[in-house]
Amino acid sequence: MIDRDRVRTVMRKDWLEVVRSPQSLAALLVVPAVFVVVLPTVVLLLARQPGFVESADDVRPLLDVIPAGLLPEGLDEVQQLVYVVVVFLLAPFFLLIPVMVASVTASSSVVGEKERRTIEGLLYTPLTDRELVLAKILGSVLPAVAITWLSFLVYTVLVNVLGWPLLGRLYFPTWTWAVIMLLVVPAIAFLGTSLVVAVSGRATTVQGAQGVAVLVVLPVVGLVVGQAAGVALLDVPVALVAAGVIVVLDVVLFRFAVGRFQRERVLTQL
């Protein structure tokens, strides 16, 4: 039986550690700022310039492979290109935000405590291994999801405001984005965090623990490439299937992380 109060206590302690670290805070803010503000702003401002269609040669082939019904009717070529970039091409980048944020906080939470020599007292508390692993995972997942959702809100306002002169309508978000935010983002944040926590018992540096997050980032990068090539487009069915698969992986990986966590090994590495 998991003691929720003990889990919440550890989570609050981890959040305070992150807030007190300027380096961690900077890492948590830079990546969302690039994906949420810089990229869409550049695209939507360039779309107002003459010659935008000719400069978007890499995106134009997507217009031929997007299934009927995924693009709103009555859009000209410039409007279609803007819609494709904002709604389709930039969607996978939002999956990088929870993974990268969670990996930073999780590695700092476990390996960082080993480096600061503060984990020894935690290991001698009445916390069970399951409670400790769950606290470390949720302590990273919840901020990662919150930052991603806040980024999504900023992105929604930004693309609708900058896109209104081009499309003359509110066109974002879509149902696909709703599924991504509500289901895929929490699931993939949990997956990335569980991977980091699973290897943190043996990792000796924060950078080494963060490196394992590449295992989650690579499929997301593949999705970015697939969307750009028109091979794999994120729609509602694909997003639902992806969420289901990731949830199954979450359960398996959480059990693996609990089984792999051994207090004696961690103490011998101090």
Image (cartoon, rainbow, N blue to C red):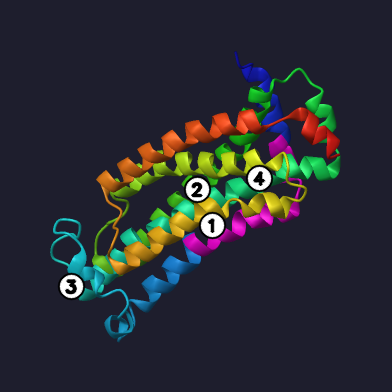
Q: Decide: few, some or many residues near mark 4? Use Cα within 10 Å; few <14, some 14-19, many ≥20.
A: many
Residue of label 3: 76
Residue 77's spot in the image, x, y percent?
20, 74
Q: Are marks 3 and 4 in contact (CB under 8 Å)?
A: no
Q: How far apart are marks 1 and 2 (CA)?
A: 8 Å
Three-letter code for the amino acid on which mark 4 is drawn: Thr
Residue 179's spot in the image, x, y percent?
34, 42
Three-letter code for the amino acid on which mark 3 is drawn: Asp
Q: Depth-wise, is mark 3 or mark 4 nearer the camera?
A: 4
Q: How many marks?
A: 4
Q: Is mark 1 on a helix, strand or loop?
A: helix
Three-letter code for the amino acid on which mark 1 is drawn: Pro
Q: Which of 36 and 166 is in front in this view?
A: 36
Three-letter code for the amino acid on which mark 2 is drawn: Thr
Quarter of the image where the N terminus is located? top right
Of labels 3 and 1, earlier in sequence is 1
Q: What element carries label 4?
A: helix
Q: Which of 176 and 220 is in front in this view?
A: 220
Bounds of the magenta segment:
14-35
Residue of label 2: 148
Of labels 1 and 2, earlier in sequence is 1
Residue 28's spot in the image, x, y percent?
62, 53
On screen, residue 237 above or below 46: above
Of labels 4 and 2, earlier in sequence is 4
